[in-house]
Structure formats: C-alpha cells, structure tokens
Image (cartoon, grey):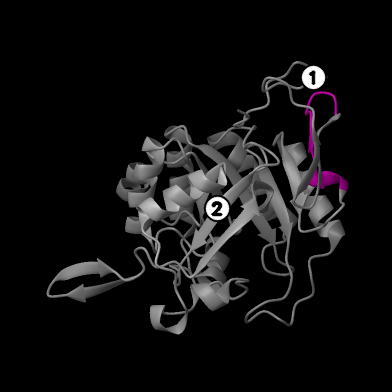
Amino acid sequence: MKINRDGRLYCLVHSRPSAVMIDPIEKEPQLHHKPGTEILCVGTVGCNFSCKHCQNWSLSQASPNERSVFDLSPQALVDAALERNVTAISFTYNDPIILFEYAFDTAVLAKEADVGIILHSNAAMNPEPLRKILQYTTAMTVDLKGFCPEIYREFFGGDLDMVLNSLKIIKEEGVWLEIVNLVIPTINDCPEEIKEMSEWIVEYLGPDVPLHFSRFFPAFKVTHLSPTPIETLEKAHEIARNAGVNFVTIGNVPGHRYNSTFCPCTGERLIHRNHFHMLYNDIVDGKSPFSGRPVPGIWE
C-alpha cells in the first residue's frame, strides 16, 4: 500500500502492522517445518486481491487510517522474535506484497540474526521482486485458490498464470513451499479442476510439495454458501493422492484423520495432529522410520 508524493512511491504500512500475534506454525499452515513450534505472525492492512470470501477482510480491505497500528520497526520485529525464541517471523493475515519493503527489510535483518522468515502469499508477484525477497526467505505458504482462470479473475481478483509462474520460481529458488487450496462449494470444488491442479503440481513442482485442502466457512461477502462438506474435502484428498501428490492434508476440520501426515510408502502416521496441535512426530533425521523414505521439509 503506497502513495505517490512528488513522483516517489512511499510505503504507508512500513513498520505499522495492524496485527501481531504468536501462533503455532501449524496454523500457517507449515506442516513440514519444525512441527510443534511457534511463529511471530505479522500483518498490515491492504491486499492486492479482492477475494469475496476473505476471512481477514477487516484487515485486507481496510486503509491505514481505519485500523489501529503498532509501531514496530524491522529491528523491533527481529528482537521480538529472538526474545520469544520463535521459529520464524511470518508475514501473513494480508498479502506480503502489500508490505513488501517492510517484509524485505525485516527479512534481511532476520537472516543476519538466524531468524526464519515465512511468507504466506497469493503469489501474485512479479518475478524480479519475488526472486529478490526469496533470497532471504525460509519458507512460503501459497494460497492456490483454484485452477480456473475465469474464477480466479472474477471471484478472487487475481491472475492464475502469474501465480503458477511464481510457484515455479519459488521451487527454482529452493525455498521450502507448501500449498493451500481453500475448497469453496460451487466456486472451486470441481473434481476435474482439482485433478488438473494436482497433476500440475506433480509435473512442475514435484510430488513431495505438501498440498493442504482447507474447509471454507461463510465470511465477508459470501455468507450464502454453506461450509465445505467434509466429503468434498475427502474426495479432493483422494484425487490429489491418485494424481501423485505424496503429502496431502485436510485443514479446518479438527480431529480429522487426514489432518495428520502419513508415510506415502507404508501409510503409517508420521505426524499426528489435532487441528493446530501436534500430538507426536515420529520423523527421525528427516526420514520415515517405517520405510526409511526421506520426508522433505525443515526439521531442524
């Protein structure tokens, strides 16, 4: 979110977050990234998308003078992360592209202090700034909102091709990536599109990129739809696994079996979760103890 003053752009939200909270890393979700640890979550106002269902609409659709703000410089964020001994600072709640300069300045300092940086993004970013910030980024959670260009444009206000190109760049740069697909009834729950999306992930990103199907609940301008049927999420899980995605989970359904992570070779449970709470983690040295298969992620 910027303003043009005499031909120069100024970031209106630099060092002015409207949301700061300690959360479990599972909430991001980053499920293959130091399970059971906490992260410092930061967000400002504004967004580059206009999702009709946004659950953070009070932030994403607000302007700086409509929300109270904290005065937290990049150094103050890093100091807070060190003091709380969190795994990472996560720029979330609204898209990091809105606070790019703030996130980038923090990421540079965080890398020097050995503090991780997570970006939770819709990934609608041009290649040059994306590659620039990825040099200082530990992990990304990307909301892949569907696989229909028209729906992407009309319902979310974004461009699918730009997002897919960003996903390829994230993979090329070697930054740990996890993908979330919020399944919305009648909007992006078409089985054929879920199959096409899953096959694209396997082909261009690899079968080991975690894919999380999350349950929709009515919010913002979409209060006429019911929550996603659990059967729809289970069908999406089945489609993705059959397409070759090795690590598929279901989110926003506390207690569901597929909220956990399983060994793709044996079907044994590797990480047992209940919603955002990790009950146990059996991964040893980054491998499944049941098959010896490496489980990609950030475990140390």
Check disc 2 and report the residue beneath it. Answer: 40
Which secondary structure lies at badge 2?
strand
On the picture, is 47 further left or further right than 204?
left
User: Is 127 included in the stretch rendered in magenta?
Assistant: no
Question: Where residue 191 appears, x then y in whole percent?
Answer: 74, 55
Q: Residue at x 50, y 72 (%)?
A: 60
User: Is 265 included in the stretch rendered in magenta?
Assistant: yes
- The kind of residue tagged 1 is Pro
Residue 118 can be seen, yes or no: no
Looking at this view, name the residue that lies furthest to the front.
83
Check disc 1 and report the residue beneath it. Answer: 289
Residue 129 can be seen, yes or no: yes
Mark linked to residue 44: none
Q: Earlier in the sequence, mark 1 or mark 2?
A: 2
Question: Where residue 105 appears, x then y in whole percent?
Answer: 33, 50
Closest to the observer, 194 or 133: 133
Looking at this view, name the residue that lies furthest to the left.
6
Question: Where residue 203 appears, x then y in whole percent?
Answer: 58, 35
On the picture, is 3 further left or further right than 252?
left
Q: Residue at x 54, y 69 (%)?
A: 156
Circle 1 crowding by C-alpha within 10 Å: few under 14, some 14–19, many from 20: some
**Span colored in magenta:** 257-267
Q: Residue at x 65, y 40 (%)?
A: 210
